[in-house]
Image (spheres, grey):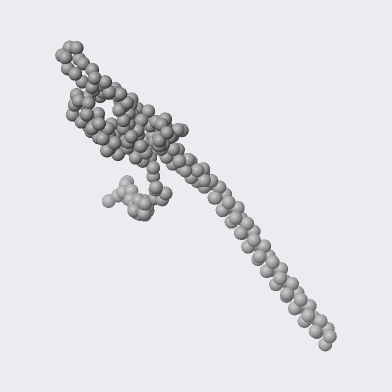
């Protein structure tokens, strides 16, 4: 009887041992498979390493564009408006522009009450009557992008050829931040959904199969 019980005990122990060995072997196989898969995924992930570099390059490009265009002004529009606003009887003989740059956007006229701005336009010209320079100041200051226009000097002159009399003047107007075009500023951070939908739709269309040729053609 004792021998029988001991035999049964040995069978149970042996069965438990082989069961544990089988479970361990299965676990080791699964672990090896996961390690192999991990290595595969790491290798695949490494192929996308350029994305971080590309993202950094994109961010730098956006920032560089914003910085370079931070003082951009649509001069064609503003100068056309400036010259068109001059009252009749006013002519310009000279005009010079001094504009701020991304490295130094703040400029002032040097007076105690000066406000930071984008620079100035200095001009000289002729007026048929002395009061036209006052109208010129009002016209320039009424334009968006310009302010604090003044006439520094005004002197009566004559033309020896035809005897005409005119007032020669010089002055300047300040360029304000309102003159900035904002053309290089963008708030887009994601691809529009409608554009993504078009791309996905085009990728979902299967390519057409080539027409049969040779003996298989009817």
Against 14, residue 162 (above or below) is above
Left or right, residue 203 beside residue 5:
left
Nearest the viewer among 35 and 129 is: 129
Give the image quarter of residue 36: bottom right
Task: Answer with the quarter of the image where residue 96 lies.
Answer: top left
For the point 16% across and 14% down, which residue is it?
A: 163
User: Outermost residue, right direction?
Assistant: 2
The residue under the point 63% across, 62% down is 30
Name the side, left or right, on which 33 lies relative to 98.
right
* Picture layout, residue 46 above or below residue 173: below
Of residues 139 and 167, the one nearer the viewer is: 167
Name which residue lies at 36% across and 30% down: 120
- Where residue 6 appears, x then y in whole percent? 81, 81
Which corner quadrant of the image does residue 167 belong to? Answer: top left
Residue 54 visible in rendering? no
Q: Residue at x 42, y 30 (%)?
A: 110
Picture coordinates of residue 145 (x, y %)?
Answer: 32, 37
Q: Position of residue 82 (x, y in %)?
A: 26, 32
């Amino acid at each position: 009887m004792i021998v029988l019980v001991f035999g049964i005990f040995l069978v149970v122990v042996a069965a438990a041992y082989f069961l544990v060995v089988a479970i361990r072997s299965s676990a080791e196989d699964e672990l090896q498979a996961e390690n192999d898969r991990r290595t595969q995924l790491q290798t695949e992930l490494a192929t996308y390493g350029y994305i971080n570099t590309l993202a950094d390059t994109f961010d730098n490009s956006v920032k560089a564009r914003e910085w370079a265009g931070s003082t951009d002004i649509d001069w064609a529009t503003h100068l056309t408006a400036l010259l068109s606003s001059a009252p009749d009887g006013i002519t310009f003989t000279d005009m010079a522009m001094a504009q701020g740059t991304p490295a130094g956007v703040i400029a002032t006229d040097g007076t105690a009450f000066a406000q930071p701005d984008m620079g100035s336009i200095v001009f000289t010209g002729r007026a048929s009557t002395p009061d036209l320079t006052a109208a010129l100041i009002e016209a320039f200051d009424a334009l968006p992008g310009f302010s604090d226009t003044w006439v520094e000097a005004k002197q009566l002159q004559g033309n020896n050829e035809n005897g005409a009399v005119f007032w020669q003047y010089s002055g300047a107007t300040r360029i304000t931040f309102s003159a900035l075009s904002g053309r290089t500023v963008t708030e887009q951070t994601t691809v529009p959904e409608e554009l993504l939908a078009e791309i996905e739709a085009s990728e979902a269309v299967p390519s057409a199969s080539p027409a049969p040729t040779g003996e298989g053609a009817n």
